[in-house]
Image (spheres, rainbow, N blue to C red):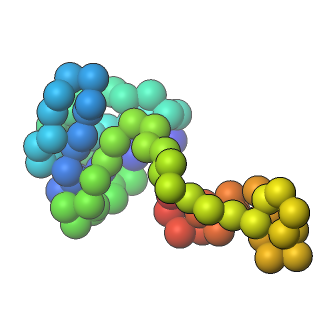
Amino acid sequence: MILHFQNARLIDPEAGTDAPGSLTVKDGLILARDGTAPKGATTIDCGGKCLAPGIVDIGVKIGEPGERHRESFRSAGLAAAAGGV
């Protein structure tokens, strides 16, 4: 599957960049940056939202350990995935 993300805010901490652009990805690997969508690609308009490698929210609080009646690592992970994280 080829995905083309356009109108994104591309953040690359390793390169020190934070700029608008587009990104083309195939099977989880980056094919191109700031190009046009290849034929057959699914285009996603990011509406200026951030696109970055592996962001981790270190401020997340869940009910583990001891409060599984509220939330577990699994339910927190599923909620994050449903929200687009």
Q: Nearer the viewer, residue 31 or 8?
A: 8
- Is residue 40 visible in this depiction of the protein? no
Q: Residue at x 68, y 58 (%)?
A: 77
Q: Nearer the viewer, residue 59 or 74?
A: 59
Q: Residue at x 17, y 28 (%)?
A: 16
**Is 28 positioned to the left or the right of 12 in the image?**
right
Residue 25 x %, y % = 39, 36
Within the image, what quadrant is residue 71 found in? bottom right
Q: Residue at x 44, y 28 (%)?
A: 29
Q: Residue at x 79, y 59 (%)?
A: 64
Residue at the bottom extreme, as displayed: 70
68 above or below 30? Answer: below
Residue at the top extreme, as displayed: 15
**Is 85 positioned to the left or the right of 53 in the image?**
right
**Is 83 positioned to the left or the right of 44 in the image?**
right
45 above or below 58? Answer: below
48 above or below 30? Answer: below
Residue at the left extreme, as displayed: 19
Q: Nearer the viewer, residue 18 or 22?
A: 18
Q: How many discs appear?
A: 0
Residue 57 x %, y % = 48, 51
Residue at the front extreme, as displayed: 66
53 above or below 58? Answer: above
- Is residue 29 visible in this depiction of the protein? yes
